[in-house]
Image: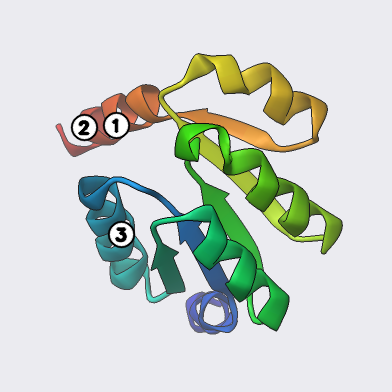
C-alpha cells in the first residue's frame, strides 16, 4: 500500500510558482523529501510557458505581485488542481471565487513549526 502511494506521487508533477528565493528553496526541499517531482519557477511568465507544455498535474502559486490569477486561471482552465499559498489575505476571496484553495503562508509555517515540536 505504501509503495503504491509513493509510485502515484512519482507520477505527479507539481509546478510551484514562487518569487521569493527562501520559499522556493523550502518548497523544493519539501517535495524532494517526499519523492514528488516539482518544477519551481519564479515568475508567472515561466509558469505559463510550462503549463502550455502539458506536463504539469498540480499548481501551487504565490501571489506574485497580483499576477497569481493569470497562472491560476490558465491551470484551472486545463482542469488542474490549483492552490494559492500567500501571506496576502486580500487574495483569499478572489481565490475562493475562482474555486481555488487559499492557504495562508503564515499559518502554514506556524502549523509546520508546531508539528516539529
Q: Write the residue at 75% across / 60% down.
A: 80
Which quadrant: the C terminus? Answer: top left
Q: Is residue 94 above or below residue 17?
A: above
Mark 2 touches mark 1? (CB < 8 Å): yes
**Disc marking residue 30:** 3
Secondary structure under tag 3 reads helix
Q: Write the residue at 40% across / 65% down.
A: 40
- Which label sits in the foreground, 2 or 3? 3
Q: Write the residue at 21% across / 32% down.
A: 113
The image position of residue 102, as x and y in percent, is: 59, 31
Residue 11, by quadrant, is: bottom right
Mark 3 touches mark 1? (CB < 8 Å): no
The image position of residue 14, as x and y in percent, is: 53, 67
Inter-mark Cα distance, 3 to 1: 13 Å
Question: In the rendered image, which residue does mark 2 sit on?
Answer: 113
**Disc marking residue 109:** 1
The image position of residue 108, as x and y in percent, is: 37, 31
Amino acid at each position: 500500500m505504501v509503495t503504491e502511494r509513493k509510485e502515484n506521487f512519482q507520477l505527479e508533477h507539481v509546478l510551484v510558482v514562487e518569487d521569493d528565493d527562501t520559499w522556493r528553496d523550502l518548497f523544493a526541499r519539501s517535495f524532494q523529501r517526499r519523492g514528488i517531482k516539482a518544477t519551481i519557477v519564479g515568475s508567472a511568465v515561466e509558469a505559463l510557458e510550462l503549463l502550455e507544455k502539458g506536463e504539469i498535474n498540480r499548481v501551487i502559486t504565490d501571489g506574485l505581485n497580483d499576477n497569481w490569477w493569470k497562472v491560476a486561471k490558465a491551470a484551472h482552465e486545463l482542469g488542474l488542481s490549483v492552490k494559492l499559498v500567500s501571506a496576502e489575505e486580500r487574495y483569499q476571496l478572489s481565490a475562493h471565487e475562482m474555486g481555488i484553495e487559499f492557504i495562508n503562508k503564515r499559518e502554514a509555517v506556524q502549523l509546520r513549526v508546531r508539528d516539529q515540536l
